[in-house]
Image: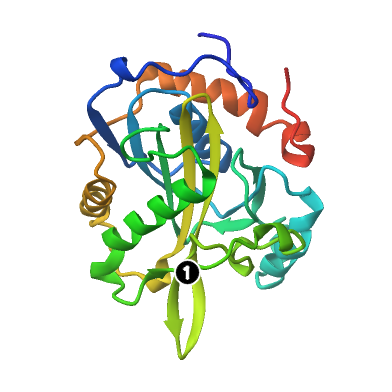
Amino acid sequence: MPPHTPINSNLPSESRGTLPAITRLLIPEALDADQNMAIDEVLLDGQGWALRITSWLSRAITIGRFQQRSDCDELKAQISGHRNNSSGDEGPTVIRRITGGGAILHGQDLTLALAGPCPSPVFPERSPASVADRCARSLVAALLPGCPELQCRGGEERQRRQLDLADCFLRSSPSDLVVNDNGQVRKIGGLALHFRRARVLIQISIDRGQISLGSGQEETFLDRWSDALEAPATERGELSSEEMSEAEHLRQVRYRSPGWNHSGVASP
């Protein structure tokens, strides 16, 4: 296996001339939180485009790359407080993402990942604001059939003034997916990004209760999303054995590491 690329890698950019002209649409089986995060990072380090629906074996909280672990303690306590803990259940697993943003409870949301070259025809500008806006607008177009009121929030970027808000869905960003709820704008989806070399990973969480997307409609949605992005031609894909091997390596050295999950420092 080739050596893992560190988070702050400055290696040369991926050659655009060797990129596959295919976007893989991935719907893997339900996995543990650490496996899901490792697979997304493998897709970031890969080539070409990948659009993925993420499924969870059990509920989990992912925290942003730069969040303090203690920031999500209150959120975890609130979640656990609504459950019967007489069995000794400690509540959701907490895993740190490589993307930014706030804490998210997964398990009943629509969790998505997009990985591909940037800059590229899909994302011409290597700018967080530009990439997030382009991605959010493509999601609105793909989800409109099941959520006619869905739109992007737009407006001023205020994330830097909201770092004290641990919960992603309490923060406000122009790329938020929002609906009108009795005259009030309510956030139902958020995006988080990570750039590495000439690529970008976007992780997305959307409230499933606000969209009409049945369990048998995921492939149709991914097709619509790919079309809205104007990404290359698509095909149903699977992770290769090499990708699964690399994901397992990342799972062990990063996403199961107390150093990473508590303070953002991975094992060597």
Q: How is the image coloured?
A: rainbow
Give percent across and percent down for residue 20. 26, 22
State the residue in front, 35 or 139. Answer: 139
State the residue in front, 137 or 32. Answer: 137
Crowding at label 1, few (<14), some or many (≥20) Cα neighbours within 10 Å? Answer: some
On the question of residue 56 being in view, the answer is no
- Which residue: 60% across, 61% down? 157
Asked whether, in this view, residue 101 is left or right of residue 174, the answer is right
Give percent across and percent down for residue 87. 70, 60
State the residue in front, 67 or 33. Answer: 67
Asked whether, in this view, residue 112 is left or right of residue 142, the answer is right
Total count of labels: 1
- Identity of the residue furthest to the top in this view: 2
Residue type, mark 1 in image: Arg
Q: What element does badge 1 sit on?
A: loop
Give percent across and percent down for residue 66. 72, 44
Disc 1: which residue = 153
State the residue in front, 60 or 167. Answer: 167
